[in-house]
Amino acid sequence: MPDFELGEEYQTLADTVREFANEVVAPASAKHDEEHSFPYEIVKQMGEMGLFGLPFPEEYGGMGGDYFALAVALEELGRVDQSVAITLEAAVSLGAMPIYRFGTEEQKQQWLPDLAAGRALAGFGLTEPEAGSDAAGTKTTARLESTAGGSEWVVNGRKEFITNSGTEISRLVTVTAVTGSTGSAGGPGGTRKEISTILVPTDTSGFSAEKAYNKVGWNASDTHPLRFEDVRVPEANVLGERGRGYANFLQILDEGRIAIAALATGAAQGCVDESVRYAKERTAFGHNIGHFQGIQFKIARMQARAHTARLAYYDAAARLLAGRPFKSQSAIAKMVAGEAAMDNARDATQIFGGFGFINEFRVARHYRDSKVLEIGEGTTEVQLMLIARELGL
């Protein structure tokens, strides 16, 4: 993608998802948003289209594509419904991807076919009440106990803001937990938490998804606090190398920021599209409002933001696919795109005037939905820290 133009396969995918978003997702968006209901029928259709399996090999039930294909699909969905887009993003980049990246062959065969088909969803259990941006502050614990049938992890703790964790098709949560300590109390670095990742099926005794949050936006997305009370799973449910859980999750978040940036770019572009349409239809003072330079300049700035955000996530994705360092670029893309979505939503609401404050209008949903794009999967401040760190500061 050196010229930042979509190749034929990616363009076909974009066109297909855009048609689906306009004809299937958009008509149902207002209803699900108002009712705070999970769009099972849309998720089922996305599964049948292969969207949940886009970046996974065919041997695990995937489509044999790559991470950029996922990003392209997310941009198109994000134009019309961020709740649907985040459901796909979290299911793939946070739910299934850790298993694909770090799982054993047995774990991949057990979980990926259903996840890649959208028949099941998995959550990404990182954030805690006192461990958000400071993810290393994890307090959830997992201790290994010997039993007559073999060793088991006993998990205790809480997680917050976990997407796709409480639906009827949620089957699994990958949980970060303290499994011990490294170093010595008298050593130069002292002791540090050993953090590992544990696969916890949602039907395990002691696991509970508590009441869903009453959110400002993303109302059709499933988000719950989770509780683990003496949850017992086999020792084999550790995901990846013991003690590498924190490092592995950081890698997943680096990739996930590209996906979130794509979603945010779609939201930013969606605000442009809606504003252009409205500016051509709405009349005031004898002209459609697009005739006035104040409106023209506002929309032009919105388009510049969306275009810049798209270039940023394209660049980060190209680096990822080429096996080049992309941490800084993904942080830049996530920050730029998230801010573009929020700024464009604010401007679109202003252009729509009173109608922009009515929930049935798409720009109103974008206004409520977009703020979390500056918070989730790393706040804007965290992205700035990462960028500064990559500069050696």
Image (cartoon, helix red, strand yellow):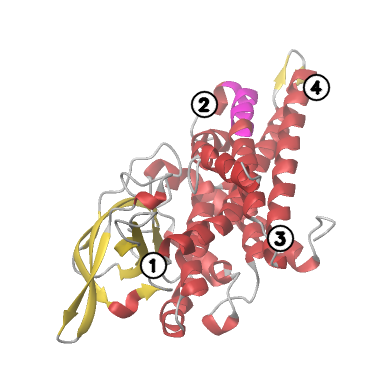
Q: Nearer the viewer, residue 57 or 30?
A: 57
Of the residues shown, which amino acid type is indicated by label 2? Answer: Phe
Counting residues from the start of the chain, the first of labels 2 and 4 encountered is 4
Could you tell me how far apart the alpha carbons at marks 2 and 4 are, in whole angstroms?
A: 23 Å
On the rendered structure, is 7 left or right of 251?
A: right
In front here: 316 or 25?
A: 316
Residue 291: mark in rendering: 4
Within 10 Å of disc 4 (Cα), the crowding (few <14, some 14-19, many 20+) is some
* Front label number (1 vs 3): 1
Residue type at tag 4: His
Q: Nearer the viewer, mark 4 or mark 3?
A: 3
Compared across the picture, whether 340 is left or right of 197 comes to: right
Which is more N-terminal, label 3 or label 1? 1
Residue 243 circle label: 1
Residue range in magenta is: 344-353
For the point 59% across and 45% down, the residue is: 389
Residue 22 visible (yes or no): no
Q: How far is mark 1 from mark 3, CA to CA?
A: 28 Å
The local secondary structure at tag 4 comes to helix
Q: Nearer the viewer, residue 281 or 159?
A: 159
Q: CA distance from mark 2 to mark 1?
A: 49 Å
Q: Nearer the viewer, residue 214 or 247?
A: 247
Residue located farthest toward the bottom when viewing the structure as drawn: 149
Residue for point 33% across, 63% down: 168
The answer to whether one can see residue 196 in this image is yes
Q: Amino acid at mark 1?
A: Gly
Residue that numbered label 2 is attached to: 357
Q: In the image, which is nearer the foreground, mark 3 or mark 2?
A: 3
